[in-house]
Image: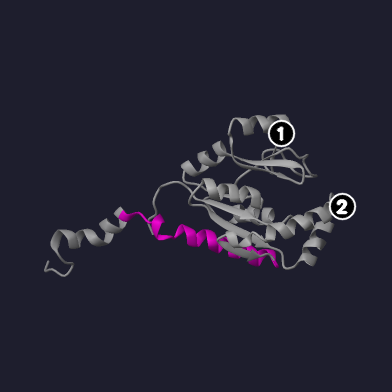
Amino acid sequence: MQKKKGKGSLFIVSAPSGAGKTTLCKKLTSTLPHITHSVSYTTRAPRHGEVNDRDYTFISREEFRSMVNKSEFMEWANINGELYGTSKKRIEKLTRNGTDVILDIDTQGAMQLKKKYRGGVYIFVLPPSMEILKRRLKKRMTNSKEEIEKRLKRAVNEIKSYRKYDYVIINKKLNDALRELESIIISHRHGVNKVDTMWVKNKFLKQEEEHGSYFFAD
């Protein structure tokens, strides 16, 4: 099917910490073409194995505040004492070239985007249960008991926002959740507003308009 060669779409994914949204987004961009994972800015320190400008762009609080003052973020939020933000310039450059972009951001940032920008697709990822979420957080060696408790309390408040999203995925098995996420992206790409109307006209309707019918003698 012929598609419009217009701007790429924006897919916004939120979930409690430990539900697996970042893993899902990264796996999606490695298996599905024409979509990229947006790299956010953050003031937190890199975790073991994280690479600057691949996982996050790590900057100081002073640099972050300067970007806020210059209105360089589409959204930004304070999460567990650290600042996170999505660059306008990065997103606009990608979507302008026709690339779909997937963002994994918290509910604060997602609701900011929903108020400011039209046309985004909002997806919420749930863990199978709070007990499983707690076990996943415990597996992260960087999380202390106090940090886990803080994230679990925050998770309850974030989960209350799920009705404000367009889709919900329960990440019980990663591969199943990944297929569900892929299906949402693919179905959106085949929306009627994505079809080139001139292509439809030239392929199927032009002859009828010129001759009055397709059923005329040669």
Residue 170 figure quarter:
bottom right
* SS label for mark 1: loop
The x, y position of residue 71, in whole percent, is: 58, 34
Left or right of 60 in this view: 168? left
Which residue is found at the position 54% from the left and 48% from the top?
115
Secondary structure beneath label 2 = helix
Which mark, by number, is residue 59? 1
Comes first in the chain, label 2 or label 1 = 1
| Residue closer to the observer: 148 or 160 | 160
What's the residue type where badge 1 is placed? Ile
Instruction: Please give the name of the residue rendered at 64% of the width and 59% of the height, measured from the top-left corner.
Output: 161
Q: In this view, does 81 lie above or below 59?
A: below
Is residue 184 in the magenta section? yes
- Residue for badge 2: 146
Q: Which residue lies furthest to the right in this view?
A: 145
What segment is highlighted magenta in the picture? 172-197
Q: Where is 56 relative to 27, above or below?
A: above
Which callout, 2 or 1, points to the residue nearer the camera?
2
Q: In this rendering, is residue 162 above or below 33?
A: below
**Residue 29 or residue 91, whichever sits in front:** 91
User: Which quadrant: the C terminus?
Assistant: bottom left
Are the two marked residues, 2 and 1, in contact with CB atoms closer than 8 angstroms?
A: no
Q: What residue type is labelled 2?
A: Glu
Relative horizontal placement of residue 161, taking residue 130 as reference (left or right)? left
Is the magenta region chiefly helix, strand or loop?
helix
**Image location (x, y in percent) of residue 89:** 55, 36
Whole-angstrom CA distance, mark 2 to mark 1, is 25 Å
The residue that appears at 80% across and 57% down in the rendered structure is 137
Which numbered tag is attached to residue 76? none
- Mark 1 Cα shell of 10 Å, populated few (<14), some (14-19), many (≥20): some
Q: For residue 83, which quarter of the picture?
A: top right
